[in-house]
Image (tube, grey):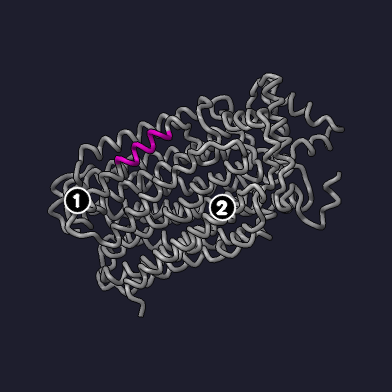
Amino acid sequence: MLSKKQARAFFLGGTLVTFLVFIGLTVYSLSKSQDQSNHENITESVVRGKNIWEENNCMGCHTILGEGAYYAPELTKVIDRLDQKYDGQGREVIKSILMSEVPWQPNGRKMVAYSMTEKEAEDMIAFFEWIGEIDLNGFDRIVSPLAKDKINN
Amino acid sequence: MKYKSQKVAYWFFALSMLLLVLQIVYGFVMGFARIGFDNLHDFVPFNTARAVHTNLLVVWLLSGFMGAAYYIIPEEAQRELVNVKLAYVQLISLAVVGVVAIVGYHFNYWEGRKFLEIPRPLDYLVVANVLLFLGLILTTLFKGKRKTTTALVLSMGLLFAALLYLPGMLPFDSQVTDSFFRWWVVHLWVEGVWELIMGGILSFLLIKLTGVDREVIEKWLYVIVGLTFLSGVLGTGHHYYYIGVNKIWLIVGGIFSALEPLAFLAMALFAVNMYRKGEKKHPNKLALYWTLGAAIVSFVGAGLLGFAHTLPQTNLYTHGTLVTAMHGHLAFWGAYGMIVLAIISYALPNLTGRKLYQSTRGRAAYWLSNIGMIGMTVAFGVAGVAQVYLERKFGMDFMQVQGEISVHFVVLILCASIFTTGIILYVIDFYKHGKPNDEALEIDN
């Protein structure tokens, strides 16, 4: 029967090994050669966009890279999506939403009116442009192989 | 209660109760917003309510863990806390930092990173607070007459939890790396070191309630926390499938996440078996309910429901949908909410000297809160699955889908009302126990 000493060795040994493997994989997957995010395309404007994104807790309603609060739309490929919906005017639509003085409320669900300046809105768009290019291992708004044709509608 | 200084635990538990009630209030704000009643939008927009809801969860659980440590460590180490005054300072500073953060969220003072919204300057205060807490607990432990495995595992969990807060404070320009290290905190907390804390509390309660030999219980405690880390550390990979990092995580995360339910299964089997083996029939049945309940519900909520969407092939569909909220609610409730309520149910009669073990109110609190939470989980689950089908398969617009699934949030609110009734009864029971007093020192636990 397992003794307490063996049980402790299992705990300490297992923890040490898995943690070392975890650190190794972290270093590997964040190394330059494995980059899937086009890291070199992160301009100052993208960084400013990310800061605005965080300062206003946009993730508290929206999702990005699938992470957030599921109350408002996924924004990973928001420019493409709105381009399709508004005949290539995606960027203009985003700007007008962000610069609006009154809450934007599609289908009655309100978004906080952020009254951003044009420059701030442009930084947000730069951020979305960079996010939209990341290789997400196949994650998309529509993922069923049966529905691939609907992506272009 | 054996040591006077254990009384400080009471106040941490009281803070916990207060924050839990507030957390529920903000949950309702969000639930109503989802069915179209967002009348509070100008004062409490959804993102504020959401940040407050999740952060209050973290703080009430931490306050509960700290209270548990202040109660358990003196008893395990067989000595008084090294400094009671500093423990009160720590309590007050925890409450102050918590309140400033929560109020700040209403005025756009936050960091906007899911679960770690506390702004950077306040982060340093959190660190100082936790260091003070750890200092008190660890010196008590090392100056004590004995160092039990239960106490060591509990303290190790608290120490690692503090260390793992740090990666969340690193600044990154890339959303991808930012998210990557955010999960070091969030995942390695809830699916790693917090389970040590849970395991430590569970083991203490089982020793007290079942009378099974400490050596037996503590041996299995090592096995369980061993399984937790073996699966949980590399299981972090399930957060890395689709956020823009290497595909290797699909394999590593997939395999090790599939093992994660094992740790919870072991915990449930362990608790139930110890209960069966135990010859001591402790009169505090309520504490026993909560203890066994925590072990079982955490297996269902964290283990099974986690597994339900953790395989990469499934997660491709469910990533970023309400399915996550389904798992999140029952997992946090079972694993951490219930274990905190278990230690409170056990400690309260000992701290106050009032043995309200048999109250109908206490039993009703247990059943109503659990039934309500299971109902909420089902409501989130149905909404989530419907969302996956409509959005990810049929390509319907996000807001259209939200309209279709809003009926499930009516169900959610109804179930949440049952849950809340249970919690209110629990809080009334807490209040009825009165304050801790020194006369309770003479009562046998």
Closest to the observer, B84 or B16? B84
Instruction: Tell me: residue A1, above or below residue B225.
Output: below
Instruction: Tell me: residue B7, above or below residue B111.
Output: below
Which image quarter is the C terminus of chain B in? bottom left
Closest to the observer, B232 or B269? B232
| Chain for disc number 2 | A
Closest to the observer, B437 or B5? B5
| Chain for disc number 1 | B
Q: Residues within 10 Å of mark 1 (few under 14, many from 20)?
A: many
Measured as percent of width and height from the top left, residue B280 is found at 25, 70
- Queried whether the magenta region covers residue B128, the answer comes back as yes
In the picture, the disc for residue B353 is 1
Measured as percent of width and height from the top left, residue B436 is found at 21, 44
Query: Of the residues shown, which amino acid type is indicated by label 2?
Result: Thr
Residue lying at the far front of the rendered structure:
A33
* Residue B379 seen in the current view: no
Q: Which residues fall within the magenta stretch?
A: B123-132
* Residue B192 seen in the current view: yes
> In the shown orientation, is residue A125 left or right of residue B67?
right
In the picture, the disc for residue A26 is 2
Q: Dividing the picture into quarters, in which one does residue B96 lie?
A: top left
Mark 2 and mark 1: Cα distance apart in space: 51 Å
Query: Of the residues shown, which amino acid type is indicated by label 1?
Result: Gly
- Badge 1 element: loop
Residue appearing at x 68%, y 21% in the figure? A102
Residue appearing at x 56%, y 59% in the figure? B305
